[in-house]
Image: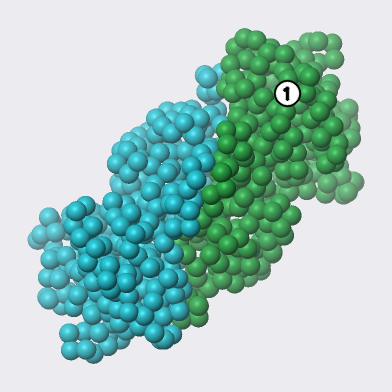
Chain colours: A green, B cyan
């Protein structure tokens, strides 16, 4: 009713595009200033990630993939924390309000709210004369005290990672016309697949419960496997050795490495993987791998936590340490 | 440790400026991707509001007031919902990382986290080539099912508002060189006081519990009293009559109206008041006013909810309806 009596620009935009996504009773149909996450006896896990046009996505990316990326980078955090999605709030800084942008954006976001059972709870829509920005704060639930942190890795724990590493960085290279774009000039299917990995993360929420049951520490890989593992080790007060030959690569990525189009170091430091990186006591690593199999997510042991405060070592097939010039992709 | 081993630009910025604000154990010292709002049996109230340079604040506003405004516009929502602050997450889109801007920003934000008992739980810091933007999602707690919504106003309920209305709009006029700036050219103290009302909202969190105990519906006044009351009435399925002579004005605002520098309609439609607007069953309005007195917040009856779906009527001293051309200030 608010918009029929006195339709402000923001109210009518919200009613038209976003009210259908607010299916949770705690969202009050987006007519209130606030939402409610109802008491359930669970802890609420909170994560927030923003994506900025020209920084985290390209101005030429389609609006539907921008919407999915904005939500999924947050869902990926929830997966790594062992939390079941409970909802999210959205801040949308818009330069224009064209239906041709908002309609596919809202439709794709709506599809993802269903796919991941993560309804829109509220938000704020503001104008900006600058680049567009989408900031999402997402909520998950875990039993009391059971969020999987970064500090619990212990020497001897196995290091595991989901999916494959480096494809998104290769997709960004394709989009920005780098060496990969050139190497795949005659292979549009490969270019498309890598671009999709960059634009549309595949968060591993189906694995969240198993991560919670088995992992001693976990985080998602967003800024590059090497840098993110370094952060996890630092938070846990340990170090790591990684067998680079065991780091899971897609066939396409492995092919590009074999052809010397890219080196494996680039894949280890590339961003936007949105896979789960976790440490697991040795006796439980098979259980996590099996849990992955039942939900269709590959889980691979890539190394071991070791004592000490040194930077994690990445060893090649001959046991030689790779000299990583760069550990992470910096969006900052 | 994360920043000592491999200090990324973002990590070191967070450690230097924001870690001291993350005093809640659920923030994990900002070394995790996520925070925890622990289970307490209470409902969690969630609100999110962003402010954009050049839209919600002026590029010339000092960083300390920008920080306070960013947090306080969210605290104001919690106050109106009857919720006790529990913490917030911060997304900061920065164009530059100058200490001369970040230091006063973080210091003032830190002071407000203490004043309002609302610790920083987490956040995200991103680069933008455009205007700076601060997006905050704030959390509060209420007993299960007790958040004060917008839909509960009933015919006969009194309409009450805290503080005074219109000062912030006058302050913005001073800053942008309008008629008020001209009229107060020789009165720097008055200009300063009005500017402060624009830059530094005074959220009424001390009154939150009384709002929860007495109000049938509530919201904060952020876009103008007239427009916000219209929204509240629409959400509740009612209408309202407001006695404009009873709308509380500061002595300065009343003086400017008396001198015909501004008309009262401008004050009713001006934004950025961040006062609580609520409806209260008649038998309880004195109790809310008394509760306000004990915490030093003026609470004033300005009208009554009436049946029907008409737009709220604003009546002057002669019972004539004001013709409001504009109900709200649109930031959009």
| Chain identifier of the residue bearing label 1 in the image | A
Residue B68 at x, y percent in the picture:
33, 47
Task: Tell me residue A100's x, y (percent).
Answer: 66, 68
Residue B211, picture quadrant: bottom left
Q: Which residue is mark 1?
A: A280
| In-front residue for pair A95/A184 | A95
Q: Residue at x 50, y 68 (%)?
A: A31
Q: Is residue A94 visible?
A: no
List x then y, in percent, for residue A321.
75, 12
Quadrant position of residue A300: top right
Residue depicted at 51% across the width and 55% down the height: A36
Say if B47 sits above or below A144 in the image: below
Rendered position, A75 above or below B212: above
In the displayed orientation, state which residue is furthest to the front. B283
Q: Is residue A8 left or right of residue B115?
A: right
- Write the residue at 77% across / 18% down: A282
């Amino acid at each position: 009713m608010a918009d029929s009596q006195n339709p402000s620009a923001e109210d009518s935009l919200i009613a038209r595009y976003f009210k259908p996504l607010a299916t949770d009773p705690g969202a009050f149909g987006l007519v209130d200033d606030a939402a409610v996450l109802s008491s359930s006896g669970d802890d609420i896990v909170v994560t927030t990630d923003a994506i900025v046009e020209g920084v985290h996505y390209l101005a030429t990316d389609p609006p539907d993939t921008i919407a999915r990326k904005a939500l999924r980078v947050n869902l990926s955090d929830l997966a790594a924390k062992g939390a079941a999605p409970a909802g999210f709030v959205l801040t949308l800084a818009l330069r224009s309000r064209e239906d041709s942008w908002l309609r596919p954006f809202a439709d794709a976001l709506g599809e993802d709210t269903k796919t991941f059972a993560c309804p829109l709870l509220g938000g704020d829509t503001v104008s900006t004369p600058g680049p567009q920005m989408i900031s999402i704060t997402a909520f998950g639930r875990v039993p009391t005290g059971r969020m999987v942190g970064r500090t619990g890795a212990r020497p001897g724990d196995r290091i595991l990672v989901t999916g494959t590493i480096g494809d998104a960085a290769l997709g960004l290279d394709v989009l920005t016309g780098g060496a990969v774009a050139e190497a795949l000039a005659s292979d549009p299917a490969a270019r498309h697949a890598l671009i999709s990995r960059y634009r549309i993360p595949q968060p591993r929420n189906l694995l969240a419960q198993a991560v919670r049951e088995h992992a001693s520490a976990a985080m998602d890989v967003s800024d590059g496997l090497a840098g993110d593992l370094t952060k996890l080790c630092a938070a846990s007060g340990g170090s790591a050795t990684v067998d680079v030959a065991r780091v899971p690569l897609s066939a396409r990525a492995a092919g590009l490495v074999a052809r010397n189009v890219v080196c494996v170091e680039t894949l280890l430091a590339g961003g936007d993987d949105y896979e789960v990186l976790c440490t697991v006591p040795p006796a439980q690593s098979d259980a996590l791998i099996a849990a992955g199999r039942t939900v269709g997510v590959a889980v691979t042991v890539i190394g071991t936590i070791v004592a000490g405060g040194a930077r994690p070592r990445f060893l090649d097939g001959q046991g030689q340490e790779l000299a990583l010039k760069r550990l992470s992709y910096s969006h900052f």
